[in-house]
Image: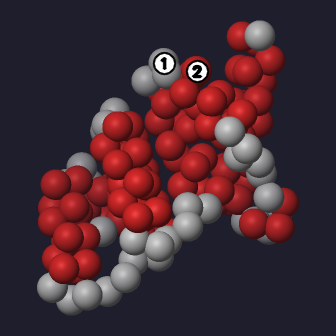
């Protein structure tokens, strides 16, 4: 799925995801959902990314810092900073246990959260 999203073939990635869930009956984890959330955000389809996260919650998979970070970045890229700030104000906090500081993906998630915090301060 990641390769499909990276090559701009988001529709095919979604079809693969749907087949995985319905036919193969594999329950995706937060990482799998994050591939789609990132893919939709990269394509400027943040509302679709949010729907993926809603589907994720509905199916018993709890979003993690990377899912929220991707969505917040997507909101910011679309100029929807208020929505990113709202997510942060709704109780989303960086969990320092959630990532290893040497892990690049964790550093990216923390940096996204910090950007939203700074934007929040500037706007208030």
The 10 Å Cα crowd at callout 2, few under 14, some 14 to 19, many 20 or more, is: some
Question: What residue is drawn where x is 15% and y is 85%?
Answer: 23
Q: Secondary structure at mark 1?
A: loop
| Spot occupied by residue 47 in the image (x, y as percentages of width and height) | 35, 37
Report how far apart the C-alphas of labels 2 and 1 lie in the structure: 8 Å
Q: How is the image coloured?
A: secondary structure
Q: Is residue 96 left or right of residue 39?
A: right
The 10 Å Cα crowd at callout 1, few under 14, some 14 to 19, many 20 or more, is: few
Quadrant housing the C terminus:
top right
Report the residue marked by disc 2.
82
Question: What residue is drawn where x is 72% and y is 34%?
Answer: 89
| Spot occupied by residue 108 in the image (x, y as percentages of width and height) | 67, 49
Task: Please tell me whether residue 33 is drawn above or below residue 92 in the rendered image.
Answer: below
Q: Secondary structure at mark 2?
A: helix
Disc number for residue 79: 1
Quadrant housing the N terminus:
bottom left
Query: Can see residue 102?
Result: no
Instruction: For marks 2 and 1, give the one nearer the viewer.
Output: 2
Residue at the limit of the structure toward the front, as seen here: 58
Disc number for residue 33: none
């Amino acid at each position: 799925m990641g390769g499909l999203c990276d090559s701009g073939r988001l529709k095919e990635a979604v079809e693969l995801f749907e087949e995985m869930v319905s036919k193969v009956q594999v329950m995706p984890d937060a990482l799998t959902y994050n591939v789609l959330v990132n893919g939709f955000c990269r394509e400027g389809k943040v509302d679709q990314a949010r729907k993926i996260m809603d589907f994720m919650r509905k199916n018993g998979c709890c979003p993690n810092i990377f899912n929220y970070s991707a969505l917040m970045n997507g909101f910011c890229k679309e100029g929807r900073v208020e929505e990113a700030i709202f997510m942060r104000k709704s109780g989303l906090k960086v969990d320092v246990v959630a990532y290893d500081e040497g892990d690049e993906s964790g550093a990216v998630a923390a940096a996204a959260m910090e950007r939203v915090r700074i934007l929040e301060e500037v706007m208030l």
